[in-house]
Amino acid sequence: MAEIAAQKTLGNHLGGHLRENGMLVALVAIVTFFLVVVRVFEGVDFLSAQNITNLFLQNSYVIIMALGMLLVIVAGHIDLSVGSVVGFTGAVAAVLTVNLDWPVAAVIPACLCVGFLIGAAQGYWIAYWRIPSFIVTLAGMLVFRGLTLWLLDGQNIGPFPKSFQSLSTGFIPDVFGVGKPNVTAVVLVSIGALVVVTLGWRARVRDAEFGMEQEPMAVFALRNLIMAAALIFVGWKLASFRGLPNVVVVLTVLTVLYAFFTENTVTGRRIYALGGNEKAARLSGISTDRLVFLTFCNMGVLAALAGMIVAARLNSSTPKAGGGFELDVIAAVFIGGASMSGGVGKIVGVVIGALIMGVMNNGMSIMGIGIDYQQVIKGLVLLAAVIFDVYNKNK
Amino acid sequence: MAILEMRGISKVFPGVRALDHVNLTVEAGEIHAICGENGAGKSTLMKVLSGVYPHGSYEGEIFFDGALLQNRSISDSERKGIIIIHQELALVPLLSIAENLFLGNEVASRGVINWPETFQKTGVLLRKVGLDEAPGTPVEKLGVGKQQLIEIAKALAKDVRLLILDEPTAALQENDSQKLLDLLLELKAQGITSILISHKLNEISRVADRITIIRDGASVSTLTAAEISEDRIIRDMVGRDMAHRYPERVPNVGEVLMEVTGWSVWHPEQTERQMIRDVSLTVRRGEVVGIAGLMGTGRTELAMSLFGRSYGRAITGQVKIGGKVVDTSTVSKAIAAGLSYVTEDRKALGLVLEEPIVRNITLANLFGVSRRGVLDKRRESKVAEEYRRSLAIRTPGVFQKVVNLSGGNQQKVVLSKWLFTDPQVLLLDEPTRGIDVGAKFEIYGIMNELAAQGRGVVMISSEMPELLGMCDRIYVMNEGRIVGELSRAEASQERIMALILKAGGKATSNGKAA
């Protein structure tokens, strides 16, 4: 009897949280798929140390921008300009470092400021003039693409000094001096895994205290086991290659910060309320205009950071850099479970969504699938993820 | 001969019997007025008639032209010539008069619109309703009065046989109202039957041949023109017995807590329209103060403009709380000054429906559960849990989404949210609307408890028995003004109604003089 009851609650729970766990399952499934297929047809190890490193280097900018885009979308808006902002800030970085010989330590904050100002300029019209964000950022997309071309005069500018390149292609050195495997990487990742599991456990205990709906112990354990194992596996692989890429560290720190911000701060909570019901939020004393404005400022800063990382990776600024990135970023956010109407979405989901897109890009490229089929498949995955959401909601 | 006969119409919503065996007979070629308090069931009855509630979703029978009417939709009833014009106009502002008149009823062959014929027909219809406008004029360029006439022309375009007007003059100026009423009389001469829902007795006595009064979802009486008198109508509209539907309370009224003086508010878009005119009122500690008045008289606008200027523009006047002038220019300042506003539209303005109870309760005072901007979720959950217990919110847990709660429990969540800001004065706008009887009693109990704690409670309500049962003092509002103040001992439904109607009459005569 008790067993049947337990099974029933397990079933109910999985039904209710299909989305959250489904994302993780989908990611694992896609990785496994490529692991097998790539091995059989290409004779290559999909999860080799080098490919894992590549995966992160190739997709870091999408994840970074998706963090900001989640806030924009949760607030009930959209930002189509981020791809152009990536190009523009990359160009600014190139002009400052290569043409004007600014020190890298000054260029990075300067570019972040440029990103902030771009976000502020767009956010101003959206928040205070109530011009639809779709239109303002569509204009921004054109304006900043044009300004990129103008700034670069249609040419590529490069190469960057070593210190700037390390933004993207640098690795954390091994402080323990072993080198191979990189002990620092192993230690940092192990600590990370421990922290994830501990925080998860603490949240679970707190939820139990207030009678919040609990996920069954089995699901909790399995989920944490998968996450910790994946983390340690990835860390070990990276350690056996060149260590932790700087980008991965930046990425991890930002992800943790934004996850904390969205779940545990007053401002983060208010953004969700704003997206869920703007009028109710305003009548609860929340200055919704300013909040929207700040959301776009934040998006601008993250786009600028992504712009520099892209420029550093290519080791030059090109007029076409960042073209179409906005679509990858927005797709990652929606695959990650955010709602078009605002108020819904989680940082963890978005990161997983971005990883799904990234793994598919990488896997299909290794298999030599043409860019034509790649686009079709990615489009269908986005559509399927959102249909899955809508179906679940209507059920 | 009767063109319409509604027999024993009953309509039940979850928890509410909106209509209870209503009978209505309308003779061919007459103007038949329907009168009743807000919430008496007039609109529901008209929705049954016009097919908004299809056949089968109500009990009873409707005969139109002697044949049983079984509408499945609005278009069904429109085809038979029953056309309803709602209070909120259903025109597309950016389309032209001609396009609006034939919207969904286009003069076309095989999907291609015949513009010359459309314009020619539009001209004929406009002459019929006495409008001298070019058929190509966008509707938004016209005033509300003319838009109302366009609605009637639209009905005429569909070969109307029974025209239903739901408070058509509520938003109109005096001379526009007169024009509209003249038009009704003219249509009557052409043989079109009308049903007129209205609060304004002078209008009814001017045009109506007969009047049916509805109260508490039942038809009380049908009077002929000769029998129509203000006293009779008021008595029939409000005459219900007051059972013990309100919790016992011994008022303990203290010193003046909030004082509003010379409060004036203008409409946010229509710059020439003043919504609140020089309103002054006081609320004492431990007092429950009512604001009575018909819908659209500015009660909600008053409350929202007081609460952080959430409504209107060019606001003038002064608010004192606890003897000191306070700044209520934004919502957060108003909250800090000790004001709270529970909106009449819970779902659209009061709650984030897709979020859990706990997040809704703390929304207006997140700093009360956080340290340096970081939320203490343990404390947050405890706070929510306390309100769940003290206000008896019926839910499996505070992490349930509010969208899944019943109306009464949702209202308790809204009240919890405001209680957590520790307000001195609560402005409650229709706090029991859409709530079943049992939950109403609980809400009343909470209000009494708040007053007993020494807070001031202001209750806006369209239900007079509720005001009479709950309030120590009642202000009566009409057309943006406070037209009277009654103590508990003085107050009665008849006196409130009389104050409203007399003020309305005065405004009318003023309008004529001007």
Image (spheres, coloured by chain):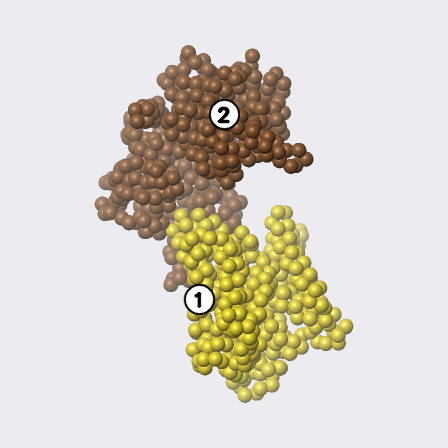
Chain colours: A yellow, B brown
Quadrant the N terminus of chain B occupies: top right
* Residue A366: quadrant of the picture: bottom right
Furthest toward the right, the residue is A41
Furthest toward the bottom, the residue is A177
Figure check: A134 above or below B240: below
Figure check: B68 above or below A141: above
**For mark 1, does the 10 Å Cα neighbourhood hold few (<14), some (14 to 19), or many (20 or more) residues?**
many
- Residue B184, position as x, y percentages in the image: 47, 21
Alpha carbon separation for disc pair 1 and 2: 60 Å
- Residue A238, position as x, y percentages in the image: 60, 78
Look at 34% across and 50% down and name the residue there. Answer: B330
Name the residue tied to disc 1. Answer: A116
Which of the numbered marks, if any, corresponds to residue A266? none
Q: Nearer the viewer, residue A224 or B104?
A: B104
Chain on which label 1 sits: A
Q: Which of marks 1 and 2 is in front?
A: 2
Furthest toward the front, the residue is B116
Quadrant the C terminus of chain B occupies: top left
Chain on which label 2 sits: B
Q: Name which residue type carries label 2.
A: Arg
Name the residue tied to disc 2. Answer: B127
Look at 35% across and 29% down and name the residue there. Answer: B468
